[in-house]
Amino acid sequence: MKTTNLAITAAVTGLIALGGATLGAAPAHAADKEKCYGVSKAGQNDCATKTSSCAGTAKADNQKDAFVVVPKGLCDKLVGGSTESA
């Protein structure tokens, strides 16, 4: 019974450590992304806008206050793309 408890404790500790490593990597990954306004299709935006409360609710294509998350540097290459909301 004591061996089983040690094995379970070791497994849980390993999962916690793995989760901590994953969380540590997330901010670096997020730094490689940017919000790109004015390029999403209607209903395909990633988050809320000035006129709607959640993702997927942009009412028009290329809505200036709706964004999608793209790799850093890509937005400047997209026609109509801006890293700032209008």
Image (cartoon, rainbow, N blue to C red):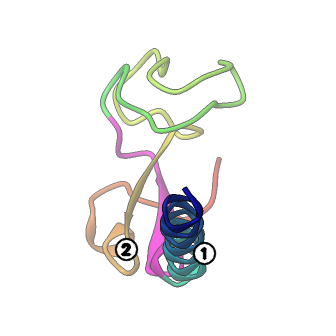
Under circle 2, the secondary element is: helix
Q: x%, y% of residue 81?
A: 40, 58
- What residue is shown at x 49% (from left), y 59% (from top)? 4
Q: Which residue is mark 1?
A: 20
- What residue is shown at x 45% (from left), y 78% (from top)? 29
User: Start and end of the magenta stretch?
Assistant: 29-40
Q: Amino acid at mark 1?
A: Gly
Residue 34 on the magenta span: yes
Q: Amino acid at mark 2?
A: Asp
Under circle 1, the secondary element is: helix
* Neighbour tally class for label 2: few under 14, some 14-19, many 20 plus, Cα within 10 Å: few
Q: Nearer the viewer, residue 50 or 8?
A: 8
Q: x%, y% of residue 78?
A: 27, 63
**Quadrant the N terminus occupies:** bottom right
* Neighbour tally class for label 1: few under 14, some 14-19, many 20 plus, Cα within 10 Å: few
Q: Is residue 78 above or below residue 68?
A: below
Return the mark for residue 83: none
